Amino acid sequence: MKIINPNLEELASYDHTLAIAREHYGRRGNSPSGHHPRTVMSAGNEAPDVYEAILLAPGENKIDVEIDTRLPSAAIFTFHKEDHTLGNMLRTRLLKTPHVIFAAYKVPHPLTPNFLLRVQTDGEIAPRQAVINACHALIKDCGILSREFTKEFELRKMANAANQQQQGAE
């Protein structure tokens, strides 16, 4: 287990981010208990704040890597504060990669925001490099999707404006 000693700037940055998250996602609303309207309270226990599912604590790693000794060229990646959305996208992208033999993910428990991704390669590239390549490809795909969506949205907006102008002239 790696222990990280954060400096004061990191802690100040974390505190500032935490304050923003509390303000935006935290305990607000007009409910009688003073909690966020979506917060579910159980008997005597307070539910965790909504932002705790997305913010990393100081010294908490986003991804932990464990080499799988049972199989050659295999590793298990634990993604913290992520869910099925990223897990399925990574698995799908990894399976399209030529050197990846196996890729699967699982969510250990539905109430914990993390998933395990198991990757096995043919040995030409390391599992870590395969995941990095898949992440880069996903970022590129999301950029293309964003550009195409924006383009179509703007075209639709212009077409609607032209239709309204044409109907107004009639």
Image (spheres, helix red, strand yellow):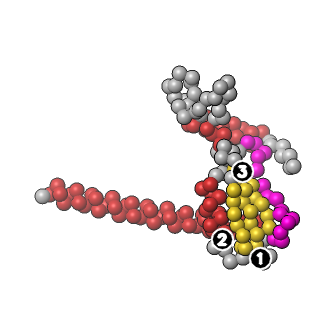
Residue 152, above or below 61: below
Q: Is residue 45 visible?
A: yes
- Where is residue 170? Give x, y as percent: 12, 58
Q: In which image quadrant can residue 133 be found? A: bottom right
Residue 107, above or below 43: below
Task: Give the residue at mark 3.
Answer: 108
- Where is residue 112? Give x, y as percent: 69, 45
Label 1, label 2: how far apart the Cα atoms are: 12 Å
Q: In which image quadrant can residue 89 be found? A: bottom right
Helix, strand or loop for disc 2: helix
Task: Give the residue at mark 2.
Answer: 95
Label 1, label 3: how far apart the Cα atoms are: 27 Å
- Where is residue 61? Give x, y as percent: 76, 50
Task: Give the residue at mark 1.
Answer: 122
Q: Earlier in the sequence, mark 1 or mark 3?
A: 3
Residues shaded magenta: 57-73
Helix, strand or loop for disc 3: loop
**Residue kind at label 1, given as amino acid type:** Asp
For image coordinates 83% across by 62% down, the residue present is: 67
Q: In which image quadrant can residue 8 be found? A: top right
Crowding near pointer 3: few (<14 within 10 Å), some, many (20+)? few
Task: Compare residues 100 and 63 and report the one nearer the observer.
Answer: 100
Q: Is residue 12 magenta?
A: no
Residue 15, above or below 99: above
For image coordinates 72% across by 60% down, the residue present is: 117
Instruction: Identify the residue at the far left of this view.
Output: 170
**Residue kind at label 3, given as amino acid type:** Pro
Instruction: Report the magenta stretch's main SS.
Output: loop
**Residue kind at label 2, given as amino acid type:** Leu
